[in-house]
Amino acid sequence: MEITLKIPDELARQVASEGKDPARVALEALALEGYRAERLSESGVRQMLGFESRIQVHAFLKEHGVYLHYDIYDLDHDRVTSERSRAKHDGADPINKP
């Protein structure tokens, strides 16, 4: 989808710092607000801005002071994954601990 915005040149210069493309600045602002409002996922931000990896999305969000959406379920999933990885490295069974 293509969206056209008409803003006075003076305001465009105020919003986009020297050397920045005002259209890109507007697109990034839309992506940031979409993510903050939980209407866009990390994947949506990545697609919208043409990033190739989640790491680029994370860096972009961090640069703009936006925290990742990370809840108790994510923490629990990461804990289980960490335990399995540690057990695999140590040669133990992660499910049936000794």
Image: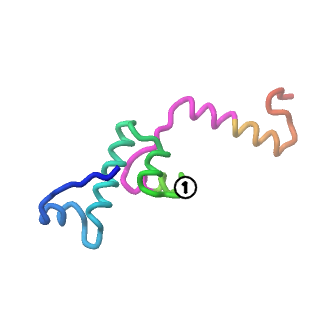
The quarter of the displayed image where residue 37 is located: top left
**In the foreground, 17 or 27:** 27
Q: What span is in magenta?
A: 60-80
Examine the structure image and report whether residue 50 is included in the region drawn in magenta.
Answer: no
* Image quadrant in which you'd find residue 93: top right
x%, y% of residue 84? 76, 37
Residue name at image x 31 percent, y 52 percent: 29
Q: Main secondary structure of the magenta part?
A: helix
Q: Secondary structure beneath disc 1?
A: loop
In percent of width and height, residue 67 lies at 42, 44
Residue 39 percent across, percent down from the top left: 38, 37
Q: Image point 28% across, 73% down: which residue?
A: 19
Residue 18 location, x and y as percent? 25, 72
Q: To which residue does mark 1 refer?
A: 53
**Quick check: 92 left or right of 6?**
right
4 or 53, nearer to the observer: 4
Q: Is residue 52 positioned above or below 74 on the image? A: below
Quarter of the picture holding the C terminus: top right
- For image coordinates 42% across by 51% down, the residue present is 48
Residue nearest the observer in this picture, 10 or 1: 1
Indicate yes or no whether the magenta region holds residue 73. yes
Location of residue 78 (image quadrant): top right
User: Could you tell me the amino acid type at mark 1?
Assistant: Ser
